[in-house]
Amino acid sequence: MKTSKLIILFILIMCSFVSNGKDNFQMPNKILILGNSIVAHAPKPDIGWVGDWGMAASCKDSDFVHILIRNINEENNQAIVKFKNIAEFERNFKSYDLGNFQSLREFEPDIIVIKISENVNDSIASKDDFQFYYERLINYLDPNNDAHKIIVNGFWPRPAVNKIVEHVASSNNYDFVSITSLFDDSTNTAKGLFDNEGVALHPSDKGMRCIANLIWEKLQKCL
């Protein structure tokens, strides 16, 4: 009888160990999503934008980030997701102080999703070596190269920039997601929904869902 009890106790301890090991070490708990106004934009009434979420989405729950958050929480309800608009880095990548991202670095994400390019000047991207600064950004955020990276190109046509982004992904063996072709379908944009052309060129709810679905194909495999 004592032997049976000891065996049962041993099995329970081992099951607990395996379970805790999975929860603490195998399942990514911290996810960082970086982008620009497609990720998040504060209200700007002078251009007709009054939301405080991904620009041109009809509500917060319809932008691609919050769609992904719902998907992530269904797979792992203990996950912590942070997201940030880093458009200033895009516009000033040569001179931008990465120290502004110290809190994101200290977050120590398990997965980093980067979806930028729209605000990088296509004509100077190669001349000013955007690749170097883009890779420097990634290395700053993950100095120990521990995080799984998912690199996403731009929604708007930026041939030179998008080519650089794809090259960074392939040369570093990062997961790559292309969303550029979505722009070819006008129903993926918010044209006709906003008077301001800049706002209207952002993804519609349909476009946001398409972006989320393409990223999710890669992201769900990491959870």
Image (cartoon, rainbow, N blue to C red):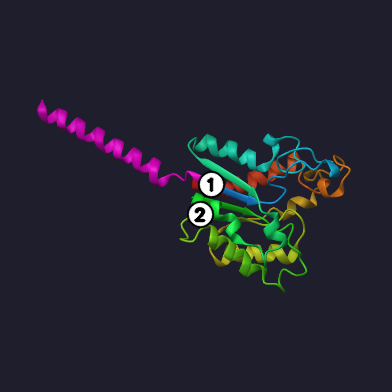
Q: Residue at x 53, y 46 (%)?
A: 31
- Horizontal placement of 123 versus 222: left or right? right
Q: Label 1: which residue?
A: 31
Q: Amino acid at mark 1?
A: Ile
Residue range corresponding to the magenta coloring: 1-30
Q: Amino acid at mark 2?
A: His
Residue 132 lies in the magenta stretch? no
- In percent of the image, x 77 and y 59: which residue is there? 157
Q: Quadrant of residue 122?
A: bottom right
**Is there any visible trace of residue 123 in the rendered image?**
yes
Can residue 176 be seen? Answer: no
* Image coordinates for residue 107, horizontal then vertical, percent: 51, 49
Q: Secondary structure at mark 1?
A: strand
| Label 2 sits on residue | 148
Structural distance between the alpha carbons of marks 2 and 1 = 9 Å
Q: Say which residue appears at 62% left-offset and 62% top-offset.
A: 97
Residue 119 at x, y percent in the picture: 74, 58
**Principal secondary structure, stretch drawn in magenta:** helix
Q: Earlier in the sequence, mark 2 or mark 1?
A: 1
